Image (spheres, rainbow, N blue to C red):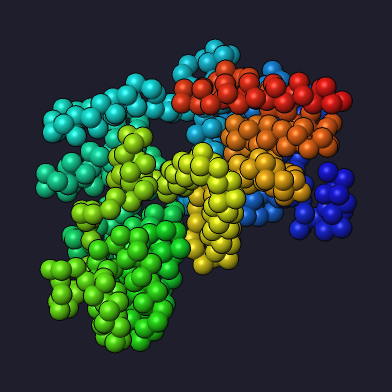
Amino acid sequence: MRIRRDLVELNGQAHTADLATSLLNYAGRLADVDEDEEAVARAEEAVKLARRLWRTDRLAHEALLANALASQGAVLARAARGGAAASLREAIALYERLVVVDDGHRTALHAARHNLGVLEADDGPDGAPATEAEPDDEAVHTYNEGVRLARAGSSEQARECYRRAAEAGLPQAMFNLGNMCWEDGNAADAKLWWTRAVAAGSLEGCFNLGVLHWKQGDRDMARHWFRRGAEAGATNAMTSLGAALWSDGDLAAAERWFRAAAEAGDPDGDHRLGLLLDEQGRHDEAGTGFERAAEAGHAEAARSLADHRMRHGRLTDAHRWWRLDQVRHEPQPPSPSEPESVPVPEPGRVHPLVEAASDQGIPVQSLQPTQMVELAGSIMDGQVAKLVGEGRLEDAVALYREQAAGLRRLLSSGAEGRVPMSAAMTYRLLQQHATYLASMAPLELALGHVDQALAHSEEAVTALGALAARGGDLLPHAWAQYVFAAIRADAGTDTERALRAVEEAIQVLGRPQHAPHEHERTRQHLSKALAVQATLLRLR
């Protein structure tokens, strides 16, 4: 903290925001160990700095002020001090403005609303809370029942379940209602429900609204919705926006969006990028795009790749990709001027993300980009568990390193503006990257790579601590603190720091307010953390 203050003295304009953020992180850590007086003072100082910056440039510093006020409200509430509700209300007002232009602030908005609701419920305010309640467990249960009924073919009963869940504020239900209205030919009601879904946080609604307006001939409004979804990280919106820009003749912008979708892992982005590059005479680059998409199971890309290989004299490779019913048949790729509606999956290999979503009962059409990151992490866990079970620790570590490197490349592309990325997506990718490092560290230790295990566990706990301070997601940080401590306990080094880390982890893991699906895993982590604490106390 002293270094931050010295930097502010040297150049306040460049470093004040960093000091405010550091103060917020510090206040949160102080509150976790019941140092209420100091926590309140540091949060108050952070708010003063953020407010001063905000007055000089509201656009640049509104998010910082909102975060500072939300953190101050949480600290004051924990310390049972006055002013918590006022800070949270001001933070909510700022977040409500911010989500209009950046949906990535919606998680913080929900957290602030939740905290205010809990505070007002405890304090017994006059009248009802000023904030809108989040969808409750009953709404989620009703929605899941709707999914079950839809799969069973009971459309009308499913529709009623979706309607009740939608009226309770669940965006997935609004989105599915829109889909049902669209299938019934009722474009007006589909538009209504998709618009409500977008307002409630469903990015897929942006894509469907774009398709609806495109088919109705309102190309400007279609581009608006495609762009909104694309800038928030929805890859189907990226490819459709690229297609619209291609039809406008803006080839550079079209390439940028196709490439963004491809780098985010969408095979259709690779395929459309290949079509665009091939048209421009950039045949080698086009072939690379076709091949990546074809290997990911994209049927049209396989046909495009076969045609590409044939035109460039690689007959054996062409026949490898051609299907039997398409030998000697010139492929007809979708026109770039006509974005498709929600595609029907081609028969053949099911994408692992789709399979994982189905296993967890998540409708594929409702998948959000951040959920895809989480599902990819679950797939990785399964692959690593299999390798570890077979005794292939080196392969497991190599897989973690490969995936972590891929996330670093994607984050770098986002930071450089080559891939549009929302704040929520950036947060989730940073969290997943740090989680991979923490997961890899015990395997490295088992292989005798002690220095690497120490370094990666340190990097993970630092990154997840910063993210927890920003987003309030404490469980991943607590788990990383346990790993940090366990590595040092096994290595017999840095005992005091390890003991502090595991004690903080135990405080978080021992709290009762975790989501139901986290209970068993949290209980296991708590048990392991207590064992590590006992080991460290013996080493003291």
Q: Is residue 243 left or right of residue 338?
A: right
- Occupied quadrant, residue 340: bottom left
The front one of 495 and 31 is: 495
Q: Which residue occupies 52% across, 30% down?
A: 113
Q: Position of residue 125 (x, y in %)?
A: 54, 15
Q: Position of residue 358 (x, y in %)?
A: 31, 39
Q: Which residue occupies 37% across, 47% down?
A: 353
Q: Position of residue 98 (x, y in %)?
A: 52, 47
Q: Which residue occupies 72% across, 46% down?
A: 448
Q: Which residue occupies 82% across, 35% down?
A: 492
The front one of 484 and 32 is: 484
Q: Is residue 238 above or below residue 153?
A: below
The front one of 515 and 104 is: 515
The front one of 144 and 354 is: 354
Say which quadrant the C terminus sits in.
Answer: top right
Q: Is residue 151 above or below residue 368?
A: above
Q: Residue furthest front?
A: 391
- Number of marks: 0
Q: Position of residue 484 (x, y in %)?
A: 71, 37
- Occupied quadrant, residue 74: top right
Is residue 255 visible in the rendered image? The answer is yes
Is residue 47 visible in the rendered image? The answer is no
Q: Is residue 6 left or right of residue 419?
A: right
- Occupied quadrant, residue 474: top right
Say which quadrant the N terminus sits in.
Answer: top right
